[in-house]
Image (cartoon, rainbow, N blue to C red):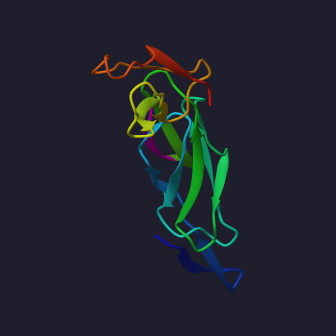
Amino acid sequence: LGQVVGTYTRAGVLRGIRLSPVITPVALALDPETIPGGFSGEATVVLDDTAPFGGASVNITASNAIVSVPSSVTVPGGETTKTFTYVTSPVGKTTPVVIRAERAGYIAQNTLLVQPTALDRITVAPTLIPAGTRGNGTAFLAGRAPATGFRVFLSSSNTSAAIVAASVLVPAG
């Protein structure tokens, strides 16, 4: 790819002509490609040639409103890539979302999998709790809790040594 340059004669005068190809997106890379809802990631648009002086504007869309993307990005002149941030919302089930980069009718796309929030880990402090005293547990989520909160169900493997609540609700956010 590049420019086509030629000459022609008109009215006895040698003239030049230059045709520039359409610069198109050839790939859209997602990092990560699978993400818990409520987190953000990065996407990179890759063009088939360097952007012209002044840059190349590329329209960006997502197939579902749970993923927020900029409406367009500009690949700087002389560059072939532009990275932008996408932001996800919490979901109740794994949801595929197609993110598209479009320029001059050419489309590059990739599918992002947005996963529901899940329990990451539970910690207890102090780690050694004398009989008859209380400890504190903290539930950590792999993602943000949805608007209705996220219920974590608890149990003790030895109820004579440790009694725990049946469940706790992690508030939204």
Residue at x-position 43% and y-position 48%: 32
Residue at x-position 55% and y-position 79%: 6
Foreground residue among 164 and 128: 128
Residue at x-position 54% and y-position 31%: 63
Residue at x-position 39% and y-position 27%: 131
- Vertical order, 60 against 45 (above or below): above
- Span shown in magenta: 107-115
Q: Is residue 143 a member of the stretch shown in magenta? A: no
Which quarter of the rendering shows the C terminus?
A: top right
What type of secondary structure mainly makes up the magenta span?
strand
Whether residue 5 is visible, yes or no, is yes
Q: Quadrant of residue 83?
A: bottom right
Foreground residue among 85 and 132: 132
Q: Given the current orientation, which residue lies at the most extreme top position? A: 166
- Vertical order, 76 against 12 (above or below): above
Q: Position of residue 58 (x, y in %)?
A: 61, 52
- Vertical order, 153 against 56 (above or below): above
